[in-house]
Amino acid sequence: MPIIRTEKREIKLKRPLAEISPSEFRRGLTVAPTFAWFPKAVIEGAEALPEVEAAAPLYTGEIVPWMQEAAAYNIALEGMCEDYQQAGSMLVSRVGDGLIPGVGVGSGTKSAKFTSVSATTVAGQRGAYFTAGGRSFFCPEYGKLTAITKDFLAWAAIPGIFAYQWFAALLAFLDLASTPINNRIRFASLKGLTVPNFVIVRSQYFPPPALTMHIGLTSNKAQVVGIQFRSSGNYTDVLASDSLDVPAGESTVDYFVACPGVTEFVCHLQPEDRTETVLDSLTITPP
């Protein structure tokens, strides 16, 4: 396994949160195309719920509370997928009832799917099983799990359980974005459960002995963002890991990476739960 050495050079606050309006915080983020009637981009799915309830009020036998909540979560995840795809990559998502019709995304070896079970079963076993890239994983109730195999990355969450229905949420990274990233990509959140982002770091001058990553982040609160460097040939191989103390507002991180002989690697970024975070950019020197 190749060895890389990392070193944070500088974390600089460009603008404090007080200087960033809500509309500016979400600038450049994409609205969910399936929900054309929803007027704005959201990062936390629960924020969309009041407008979903107004647009589709409860109606006995037709619209029930879990449907409204699932729609709000889909708005956030679908918007993130659109952000990610602006970088020339492919991310797919779905939130729905884990029993009927069940929830799955992708196809073949590039797919993830929850096992179809009742809400009673999920509550009894305190979570549910799902497959990703041909392997079985267990997602805890009211929790999340990032599924990582040699060549496939997925994210699952169970943000809620009702008497009969339960929420199964899945994301599958079918084609990873690569540097330079110059469009904004949200880290979507479902009831405080925050999704990671994965980006291939690749330079036209590879293999260089070293490079500097320039990471732009906007956060609604001070937090610690986890960062891992994974092998692009086997995502389960972690070459190095660290954490970034990110202030509330818009900031930039300069990160030195010594990587002799490494042609490319995957940068895995994970904000804290119960935060709203946007990846503003991710570029490298040399380009």
Image (spheres, rainbow, N blue to C red):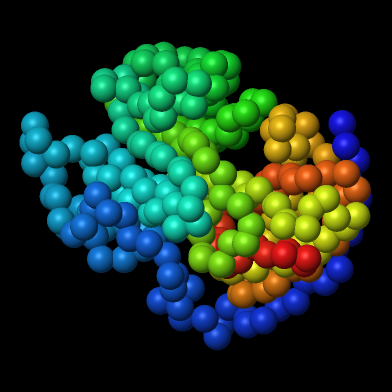
User: As rendered, which of 269 and 157 lies closer to the eye?
Assistant: 269
Residue 231: image quadrant is top right
The residue lying at 68 percent from left, 64 percent from top is 283
Q: Quadrant of the N terminus?
A: top right
Please state if 264 lies on the left or on the right of 191 as rendered.
right
Q: Is residue 153 visible?
A: yes
> In the rendered view, would you say 35 is above or below 182?
above
Residue 247: image quadrant is bottom right
**Residue at far front of view:** 205
> In the rendered view, would you say 164 is above or below 169?
above
Name the spot of residue 164 as percent of width and height, x first: 28, 22
- Count of labels in the image: 0
The residue lying at 63 percent from left, 81 percent from top is 16
The residue lying at 54 percent from left, 33 percent from top is 154
Name the spot of residue 207 as percent of width and height, x first: 83, 50
Please state if 55 lies on the left or on the right of 181 as rendered.
left
User: As rendered, which of 238 and 211 lies closer to the eye?
Assistant: 211
The residue lying at 50 percent from left, 57 percent from top is 87
Q: Quadrant of the C terminus?
A: bottom right
Q: Is residue 6 visible?
A: no
Name the spot of residue 201 as percent of width and height, x first: 70, 52
> In the rendered view, would you say 150 is above or below 231?
above
Residue 278: image quadrant is bottom right
Please state if 33 lies on the left or on the right of 23 as rendered.
left
Name the spot of residue 66 as percent of width and height, x first: 27, 37
